[in-house]
Image: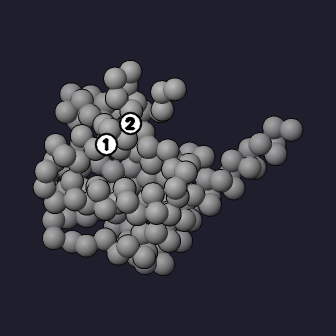
Amino acid sequence: MKTPGSTAAQPASELIDKRIAELGDWRGEVLSITRKLIRDVDPDVVEEVKWRKPSNSMLGVPVWSHDGIICTGETYKDKVKLTFAKGASLTDTGRLFNSSLDGHARRAIDVHEGEKLDARAFKALLRAAVDLNTALGKETLKGAK
């Protein structure tokens, strides 16, 4: 069975491994750490790769989902942008969100070279995002009955 965001030749997890290896610098390290934290919080997370195009080296953007997108991991020359799809609905007690603050739905964390992500605060955001997605999914199912 093909997982979301995978190709006929490669599952999404392998494409993300390839992306991390291709970066080969601090950005790959940030993505790798992010991925581990996400898996620690939600062992049932679904890894996907979306928005594949030539400007993304055809590898696309890593996406982590559970009943909807939790967050994405875009890489730029000067930062790794971790975007939470429903970030505006989450309580950010660790004050990690520092980008896309004007959006109506999403919020992002820009991590620059030399910066460390607060793992405890990041895990709290992840748990809240999974809980929100799960709750919204249950409401949708309840409304469909």
Residue 16 versus residue 59 in the image, above or below: below
The disc placed on residue 141 is: none
Applied colour scheme: one colour
Q: Quadrant of residue 31?
A: bottom left
Question: Callout 2: helix, strand or loop?
Answer: helix
Q: Is residue 79 visible?
A: no
Element type at mark 1: helix
Q: Which residue has dot 2 on it? A: 12
- Please report the residue visible at 15 percent of the width from the left and 65 percent of the height from the top: 113
Tags 1 and 2 touching, CB below 8 Å: yes
In the picture, measured across the screen, residue 137 lies left or right of residue 73, that is right
Q: Quadrant of the C terminus?
A: top right
Q: Which residue is mark 1?
A: 16
Where residue 122 sits in the image (x, y, percent)?
42, 69
97 or 54, nearer to the observer:
54
Residue 64: x and y, percent? 45, 48
As drawn, which residue projects farthest toward the top?
Answer: 8
Q: Callout 2, which amino acid?
A: Ala
